[in-house]
Amino acid sequence: MNIILSSQQEKFIQSQIAKGKYTNIEEVIDSALKLLEKQDYEQWLDETRQKVQVGLEQLKKGEKVDGEIVIAQLKAKFQQMREENLSE
C-alpha cells in the first residue's frame, strides 16, 4: 500500500521520530491506527450506554417487549451482520 502524506504530516512524523518516541514511520502509523481503533470503540461504548439508559427508562415507564421477540430480533440482526461480513 502506498500512502501520500502532506508535508505537514511528514513533518509531524519526522518530529515524533526525532524526539525518540518512535524509531520509524511504521511505528508512528501503527500507534495512530491503534488510537483510531480505541476512539471507535469508545464511541461505540458511549452509544451503547445511551441505548441502555433509554431502555432502562422505557422499562420504568412500563414500556417493554416480550423476551422471545427480542431474542428473535437479535438473531435476525446477527444473521444479517454475518451475511454482510461474508460479502465483504
Image (spheres, rainbow, N blue to C red):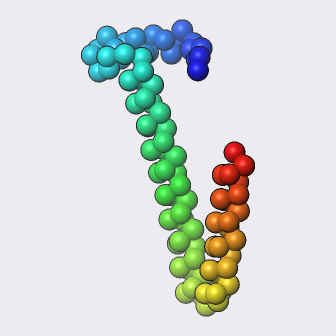
- Left or right of 51? Residue 15 is left
Above or below residue 19? Residue 31 is below
Is residue 44 shown to the viewer in this render? yes
Q: Can residue 63 be seen from the camera position used here?
A: no
> In this view of the protein, which residue sits in the foreground, 32 or 52?
32
Q: Position of residue 49 (x, y in %)?
A: 50, 65
Residue that lies at the very extreme toward the front in this rendered image: 86
Q: Viewer-proximal residue, 42 or 29?
A: 29
Q: Residue at x 43, y 29 (%)?
A: 30
Locate the C terminus by quadrant.
top right
Q: Position of residue 24 (x, y in %)?
A: 37, 16
Q: Residue furthest left?
A: 20
Residue in the picture at 32% in, 20% down: 22
Closer to us: 86 or 4: 86
Q: Position of residue 68 (x, y in %)?
A: 64, 87
Question: On screen, 43 above or below 23?
Answer: below
Residue visible at 51% across and 15% down?
9
Q: Is residue 45 above or below residue 63?
A: above
Q: Quadrant location of residue 72?
A: bottom right
| Quadrant containing the N terminus in the rendered view | top right
User: In the picture provided, is 2 more to the left or to the right than 46?
Assistant: right
Q: Which quadrant would residue 61 be assigned to in this image?
A: bottom right
| Front position in the image: 26 or 49 | 26
Question: In this figure, what is the number of numbered marks?
Answer: 0
